Image: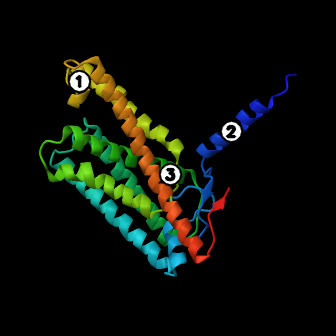
Amino acid sequence: MRTWTTARTRAYTLAVAALRRLLPGGESRQLPPMHFVDLTAAGRGGGGVVAASAEATGRPWRRVRNVLLVWRVGLAAWVVGTLSWLAASDRLDMVFFTSVNYSALSGVLFWLACATVFAVLVAKRPHRHVLWTITVVGVQVVATNALFLDVVYWALLYDTFTFSGLVVHAINAVAVLIDVALSSYHLRWAYLIPSAAVALLWVFGFAWPYFAASGNWVYDFLDYRNRSAGYMVGIYLGMTAWHLVAGSMVVGLCRLRDWAAYRRRRRSGRGVLASA
């Protein structure tokens, strides 16, 4: 029987470690567990950035958890209300990727509000469940695509200022990024893959078939008929690069939040991040 070399053993170990990071509860580090845990946080022990900050500054954790509760309920009311208004006023055309992502973002934020209400008023203790990992993936997908689409809109598509345009091309990204900064879920580099997969699925699974069926492009900059091959290559490569940058910025915000909480707790002498 052939024996494994040191290089093969190391490659196998790295592959297993990478796989474990993709599974529920596989985060490499998490804030220390607290009384109040945002149940939308996937990971070992739970632990909330907001709650940890509350302990470090001496503020009651109950007050801080209520801030998150009020924020999430208010945000859910905003997105569901604006989504209903856009649909009723015939401004929600599901042909556009923006409308698809805003609908998904509304669903994710509404679920976050429900989960937070459950965490604060019912459970009051951390629970590990695959739903929380799915929620974290959903947050990262809609946050990344919101930031990606907003910049593309203002750079390439903006024509006339409207309130509906402001809602789905600016406020959406700001709102979900604030939620990332306030909460405790641990976004990950591995989740850049599903975020990009959703965008690619829309382009090649909808935009191209839509053009084949109707003869029209959803977005004019995707129309290759009167443009050079170099332009189209640049558009697709540029969009891919910007999507990866947008996803990295979202994960970077999560890492900055963790670092700030870590620094605050270290200065107060109340502990550090636990490593798995």
Number of the label disc, if any, that sits on residue 187: 3
Per the image, label 3 sits on a secondary structure element best described as: loop
**Residue 103 locus on image (x, y percent):** 31, 47
Q: Is residue 264 left or right of residue 202?
A: right
The residue positioned 75% from the left and 30% from the top of the image is 8
Look at the image and tell me whether residue 36 can be seen: no
* Mark 2 or mark 3, earlier in chain: 2
Look at the image and tell me whether residue 170 can be seen: yes
Q: Is residue 166 left or right of residue 275?
A: left
Per the image, label 2 sits on a secondary structure element best described as: helix
The residue that mark 1 highlights is 223
* Residue nearest the observer in this picture, 171 or 57: 57
* Residue nearest the observer in this picture, 35 or 49: 49
* Residue nearest the observer in this picture, 53 or 268: 268
Image quarter of residue 47: bottom right
Q: Is residue 73 above or below residue 229?
A: below
Q: Is residue 46 left or right of residue 146?
A: right
The residue positioned 37% from the left and 70% from the top of the image is 70
At label 1, the amino acid type is Asp
Q: How is the image coloured?
A: rainbow
**Residue 256 locus on image (x, y percent):** 48, 58
Per the image, label 1 sits on a secondary structure element best described as: loop
**Residue 178 locus on image (x, y percent):** 37, 60
